Image (spheres, rainbow, N blue to C red):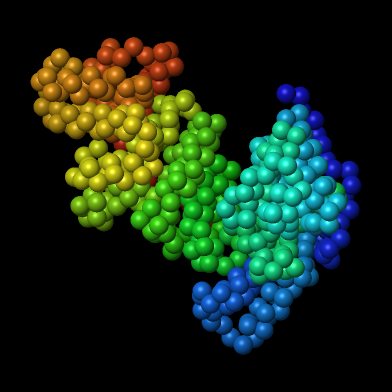
Amino acid sequence: MPQQHWLPANMARWDTAAPLDAQAAVAAADSSEQQQAAATAAAVRRNDSEKSSSRDSSSSSSSKDSSSAAASAVATDEVAVQSHPLPAYPIDDEERDSFDKAQQVIARLQGRGYKALIVGGWVRDKYLGRRASDIDIATNATPWQLKALFRDVVLLPRSTVKLSHAGEVLEVTCFRGISRAASLFSVASDAARRDFTINALYFDPSSGTVLDFVGGVADAQQRVLRLTGDSPALLAEDPLRLLRCVRLVATLGLRLAPSTAAAVKAHAHLCSVQQGLPPRRIWLELRKLHRAELQQPGTWARSLKLAYHLGLLQHLFPWLQQQQLHCSPLAAAQVQQQAVQVAERLGVAWKGKGVPLVLLVAATLHPMSLDRQQALQQFEQYFQEPSEIAAVRALLDAAVLTHASSSSSSASLQPGSSSSADDEVWVRFYAGEHAAACLDILAAWMPGAFAASFRQLHQGQQQLPDEGEEGIAQQGVAAEHADELPLASTAAADVVSV
């Protein structure tokens, strides 16, 4: 598609807040600005929590006074806001068309007296120099007011609607205020409720201005991922943000702020079905990682590595926990490291080929788990399709057979060389739709020296397309160097170094 550089012509400032000059905008990178933004966001949540009596707040009398003042300021949009121009960026016809339709929706809302702005990933990606696929809108109109203004509106949880306009489906979210009273809904209070500072940026197409209440522009320019405000409250409110943090770092090439890394480690146990997080929500986040892997090979392995170092991996995939592996903490850590190493080897072999998500996750299963049935039950919380479960069971059966045979004669690893029961295992294995990819997983689970001979024995058992054969050749190289993929304790220093 042809591309052009486009920048909104009207760069007027937002008229409901006192903007800062350009020098003050640049100063957002200073720690004092970050602390002020964090204090404002924390004040919003403290105020809301005190009203609902859901959380105790302890602070000195002076901090209480400042918190009360900050919360009051947020409620009336009197918080200082930094105004920035939207960076020039390449835009293709498809994105321009989506933007034009979003602009029409915003114009209609603003024409009826509502506040409406583009928020989140689309604005963030302009500062990161990336093409954004989705445009989200935030407004102080309620879902029922939106339903009255637009014809095709579907109500979703969390005060969100899906709105169809001129063939474009847009997600519109109501401002998250410090009170349920509509009069207190504001842009500032919504910003304080966003997960990360780089996602709390608002663009007003009518003025061409980006509004920044929490230092998100500075973080985007420095490619830093930082939680907005009160980290414990944010993560406890929605533990899926823990996994989202990993995904954003891995897919956007960001660094993790030390304070955010510490908060994620402290709350890692919340990112688990065992803690009540719905499996469907976890699966949707994993699917986003899968799409990123298809576009940027290696993303999945980077995500697992970061999840391991942040303590998330064993909670995300409970079959990797020490209690289920029935081993020492050190041995459990080694199993988790091996899961990351397997992902790295498979990333080399597959290089973004269309391997389904179920196999990416299946590769994290420990093939010799002492409690295989429990592991499969946990696995099936994410995947329920009978064909997917059958493929994973066939993979594990083949892994058990391969492990048992590896200590004896390698010739027994192929069909026709052992018992009829063993042959049935291999027949089911090769009958699967993704037998070539499953063969890659089996080889990645093995020690490097044995993997090479295993591949030679199985080379002729499955007629593979050209790209599959290329993947096998690349996998052979990866398997030979399997011992060269250690996970040092400082391996995540490149993403946690702000």
**Apparent side of residue 122 relative to residue 441 in the rendered image (left or right):** right
Q: Residue at x 89, y 53 (%)?
A: 12
In the rendered image, residue 18, in percent from the top left (x then y), is placed at 84, 66
Quadrant in the picture for residue 26: bottom right
In the rendered image, residue 426, in percent from the top left (x then y), is placed at 22, 21
Number of numbered discs: 0
Q: Residue at x 80, y 51 (%)?
A: 109
| Residue 124 appears in view | no
**Apparent side of residue 383 relative to residue 225 in the rendered image (left or right):** left
- Placement of the C terminus among the 4 image quadrants: bottom right
Q: Which residue is drawn at 77% across and 63% down?
A: 81
Say if 490 sits above or below 356 in the image. below
Say if 489 sits above or below 464 in the image. below
Say if 448 sits above or below 276 in the image. above
Which is nearer the eye, 138 or 325? 138
| Residue 207 appears in view | yes
